[in-house]
Image (spheres, helix red, strand yellow):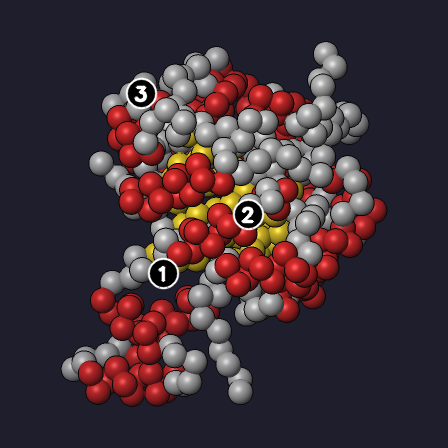
Amino acid sequence: MDRPFGLLAELTYACPLHCPYCSNPLNLGDYQEELTTQQWQRVVAEARDLGVLQLHLSGGEPLQRRDLVDIVRFASGQGLYTNLITSGSGLSPRRAGLLRAAGLDHVQISVQADERALSDRIAGMPSFERKLAAARLVKKLGWPLTLNVVLHRHNIDRIGRILDLAAELGADRIELANTQYYGWAQRNRAALLPSRAQLERAEAEVRAARARLQSRMEMIYVIPDYYSKYPKPCMGGWGRRQLTVVPNGDVLPCPTAHTLPLPRASVREHSLAWIWEQSPLFQRFRGTDWMPDPCRSCARRDLDFGGCRCQAFQLTGDAARTDPVCHLSPDHEIVAEAVRAASGETREAVLIPRPHPGARRRE
Amino acid sequence: MLLTPETVTLLNGTGAAILELCDGSRTVTEILAELHDRYDRVADDEVQLFLSGLLARRCVEVSHG
């Protein structure tokens, strides 16, 4: 059986921002009973024994956990490569210094746009200036810096200027990834999915920026999978390379797999090794035996693994179907229709901001 | 093995040997010279290509000091 390389630790779903493309679950309030510091340390140690090399600390906003420095120090002591994925909120000079001393290897900061008004509007609160300050602090302390930019209808036209901002901040790496439609992003899909014309312009801008900035930073550009011919090889295959532990201790093959009608697995009840190797959840879509046609007989089945199980379930109601993104899927019309709508007449769908976990939902 | 923010790269023996020579003081010419000392056959252009690839991914930096 394959061994996992990476553990995504979603430490908390608390976050001061309200990004409408957040992939966190809609039922945020159900995750408030978070693992303790000791429980996280046990998870990290078990992950390392299982073969994990990289620990990605995310959320929500991981800096909202007061014990973040302790978790980083423990993981670093276990020899893991540690990566903080943050909005930048809460990265004070003091906290950053402590994280540096604790052995944190890398920082990724999310940026919503290249200028304050739009960035703050997307994030749902004033945060742009703090992000810039956090990015400069990361560089000052000698960390490598990655900027994460989630692209959508409202910021994709500014991609060239976002790249210039990244260069000005001295980013070593930038991920320009179009929104993936899960969680809050799925709810806001009509307002977020860019048009084909927007994507074509963005691709031209990325090509130009590559020529201009190539020696200064690594650039990763990801188109929305709705526009690709084949589906994404989600997580590099189910239960194959990565695992995610969410704030309440549930373990998932990917951060959105909680949406699937499958039995839960929790570190509160089982070891990580048992969950990885034996739990029904991790076995369900491992390998290729579960596949229906057209995947079963497809030459690409070991390349994209049938695409995303969560997307198949979300769009067809059956998690075992081919990802409808694939042009060979019998359900592809569902995706084609969303793409046509995004590229049709201009319409202003309303963005629903992601709330705080403690906020009651009014339905 | 090379760990970068979102990937794990398994280097073969040759790749690892080249990367180990990137120690912050050797120039590319010196790295090539060292490889020629150690091995009978060294494809200079492939070493250059490998280092350019690492540079593009920001796995190494060129120091102009």
Which chain letter matches label 1? B
Please tell me if label 2 and label 3 are on a single chain: yes
At a point 43% along the width and 80% down the height, the residue shown is B24
User: Residue A163 in the image: x percent, y percent?
Assistant: 66, 58
At a point 28% along the width and 68% down the height, the residue shown is B16
Crowding near the residue tagged with mark 3, few <14, some 14–19, many ≥20 C-alpha atoms within 10 Å: some
User: Residue B3 in the image: x percent, y percent?
Assistant: 39, 58
At a point 22% along the width and 67% down the height, the residue shown is B13
Residue A124 seen from this side: yes
Disc 3 target residue: A280
Crowding near the residue tagged with mark 1, few <14, some 14–19, many ≥20 C-alpha atoms within 10 Å: few
Task: Give the position of the C terminus of chain A as an image quadrant.
Answer: top right
**Which secondary structure, mark 3?**
helix
At a point 68% along the width and 41% down the height, the residue shown is A198
Task: Give the position of the N terminus of chain A as an image quadrant.
Answer: top left
> Toward the viewer: B62 or A274?
A274
Disc 2 target residue: A68
Q: Quadrant of residue B31?
A: bottom left
**Which secondary structure, mark 2?**
helix
Work out how far the residue at label 3 is from the one at label 1, CA to CA, in angstroms.
32 Å
Disc 1 target residue: B2
Work out how far the residue at label 1 is from the one at label 2, CA to CA, in angstroms.
25 Å
Q: Quadrant of residue A323?
A: top left
Q: Amino acid at mark 1?
A: Leu
Work out how far the residue at label 2 is from the one at label 3, CA to CA, in angstroms.
31 Å
